[in-house]
Image (spheres, rainbow, N blue to C red):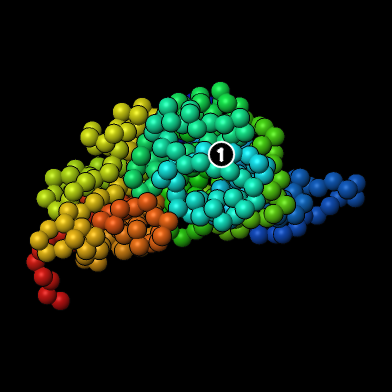
């Protein structure tokens, strides 16, 4: 279905990339598993599909839906968030220079160091919230600024419009990993970014049961043509079943995001007043250094928050953090984010040596359980009482 420019996010999420199936009248789209498509006597194909790696109807529906949600002209989907990120970096050339954030997602940092630096890419880490530092770091061969906002795990907020201006003045593109806000909370392309990148594994899927990634472009460009070429020739694409599951998740994205934001704000307010908590990182708190920018460029503050725990007479801050993560009953101690269920994790020990996360930090992916139940769980996990089990 062609989306209408006046539709709000809720309507777009439900109708984008969907049409009544012409052969059966099915209201919800079928799952197309065929790897190959018939060629007619004149050599042409029935609907332009030839072979599953190049394109297939389920993936096409997904890409149309993502494009509509993000307000782009084209989307390319991938087998994982990292495959999407890898493709964007592969579309650069050896000898190019990129600026990356100081608290870049650790998987992206590992990939740059282990794969792209030996391949000939040069990169420089900057604090993307310091615009003067960003402008000063740009070089004649800088081809891309890579940002992530809110960032992981410190929830730093980068001004998309301002960094886009710096990138464009230098003839570079701005690519933004928008996984954390999802298109429902942040219209990344409308604010000047050239590419929005998503680990669809997270909020877009929303149910912790699929792996995927996407790159959406604001305009057609030779750069995006290269992204498409790598997608189709390399084939790091999502299976039709994962595309179908992701489309199913997308239908409820705007409503899920409202619940995530509401719950996370309640928890951030609660934890900010708790004597065992040293610091809460959540852009919805007025004390957060990026609060004003987040209020302008996001329509909600998201479902992710990080906390640091105090040391006390009994334990170090790190010991208190690990104790809390071991004692929650509703929050599952596990990595990842964006699902309906709440998760808690000690980032430093997951990321290993490359981590930027303080040792006393826990990251919470706030799910859609009732907020009172979540608060009760955090409260009992933070008591000094020894639990008798
Ligand atoms: C999870 C995540 C990724 C990687 O996505 P995968 O689907 O796990 O490959 C990249 N960026 C951010 C911000 C993420 O949270």
Name which residue lies at 61% across and 30% down: 140
Give the x, y percent position of residue 271.
Answer: 18, 48
Seen in the picture, residue 80 relative to 163 is either above or below; the reply is below
Image-based side of 191 in relation to 342, left or right? right
Q: Secondary structure at mark 1?
A: strand
Question: Is disc 1's CB within 8 Å of ligand 1?
Answer: no
Answer few, some or many: residues within 10 Å of disc 1's Cα (few below 14, many 20 plus, some between 14 and 19): many
Give the x, y percent position of residue 111.
Answer: 54, 54
Image-based side of 64 in relation to 198, left or right? right
Seen in the picture, residue 364 relative to 64 is either above or below; the reply is below
Name which residue lies at 88% across and 48% down: 43
| On-image quarter of the N terminus | top right
Image-based side of 357 in relation to 245, left or right? left
Name which residue lies at 20% across and 58% down: 317
Residue at mark 1? 98
Of 35 and 376, nearer the camera is 376
Q: Residue furthest bottom?
A: 389
**Can residue 330 be seen in this snapshot?**
no
Give the x, y percent position of residue 82.
Answer: 54, 53
Of 266 and 138, nearer the camera is 138
Give the x, y percent position of residue 262.
Answer: 27, 42
Of 332 and 255, nearer the camera is 332
- Quarter holding residue 88: top right
**Can residue 5 be seen in this snapshot?**
yes
Of 16 and 71, nearer the camera is 71
| On-image quarter of the C terminus | bottom left
Name which residue lies at 90% across and 46% down: 42
């Amino acid at each position: 279905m062609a989306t209408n420019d006046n539709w709000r996010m809720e309507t777009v999420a439900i109708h984008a990339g969907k049409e009544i199936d012409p052969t059966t009248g099915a209201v919800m789209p079928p799952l197309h598993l065929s790897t190959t498509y018939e060629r007619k006597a004149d050599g042409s194909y029935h609907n332009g599909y030839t072979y599953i790696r190049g394109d297939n109807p389920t993936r096409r529906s997904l890409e149309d839906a993502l494009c509509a949600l993000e307000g782009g002209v084209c989307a390319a989907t991938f087998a994982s968030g990292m495959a999407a990120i890898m493709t964007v970096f592969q579309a650069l050339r050896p000898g190019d220079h990129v600026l990356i954030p100081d608290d870049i997602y650790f998987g992206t940092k590992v990939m740059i160091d282990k794969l792209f630096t030996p391949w000939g890419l040069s990169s420089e880490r900057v604090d993307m919230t310091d615009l003067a530092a960003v402008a000063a770091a740009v070089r004649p061969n800088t081809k891309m600024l890579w940002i992530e906002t809110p960032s992981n795990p410190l929830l730093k907020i980068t001004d998309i419009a301002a960094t886009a201006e710096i990138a464009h003045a230098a003839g570079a593109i701005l690519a933004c990993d928008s996984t954390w806000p999802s298109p429902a909370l942040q219209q990344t392309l409308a604010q000047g970014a050239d590419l929005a990148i998503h680990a669809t594994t997270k909020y877009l899927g929303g149910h912790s049961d699929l792996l995927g990634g996407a790159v959406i472009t604001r305009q057609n460009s030779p750069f995006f043509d290269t992204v498409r070429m790598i997608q189709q020739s390399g084939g790091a694409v999502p299976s039709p079943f994962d595309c179908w599951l992701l489309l199913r998740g997308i239908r409820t994205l705007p409503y899920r995001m409202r619940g995530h934001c509401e719950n996370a704000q309640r928890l951030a307010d609660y934890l900010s007043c708790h004597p065992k908590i040293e610091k809460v990182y959540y852009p919805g708190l007025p004390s957060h250094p990026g609060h004003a920018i987040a209020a302008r460029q996001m329509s909600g503050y998201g479902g992710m928050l990080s906390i640091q725990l105090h040391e006390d007479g009994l334990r170090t801050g790190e010991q208190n953090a690990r104790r809390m993560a071991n004692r929650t009953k509703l929050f599952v101690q596990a990595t990842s984010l964006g699902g309906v269920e709440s998760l808690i994790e000690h980032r430093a020990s997951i990321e290993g040596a490359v981590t930027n996360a303080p040792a006393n930090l826990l990251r919470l992916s706030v799910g859609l359980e009732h907020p009172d139940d979540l608060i009760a769980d955090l409260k009992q996990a933070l008591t000094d009482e020894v639990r008798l089990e």
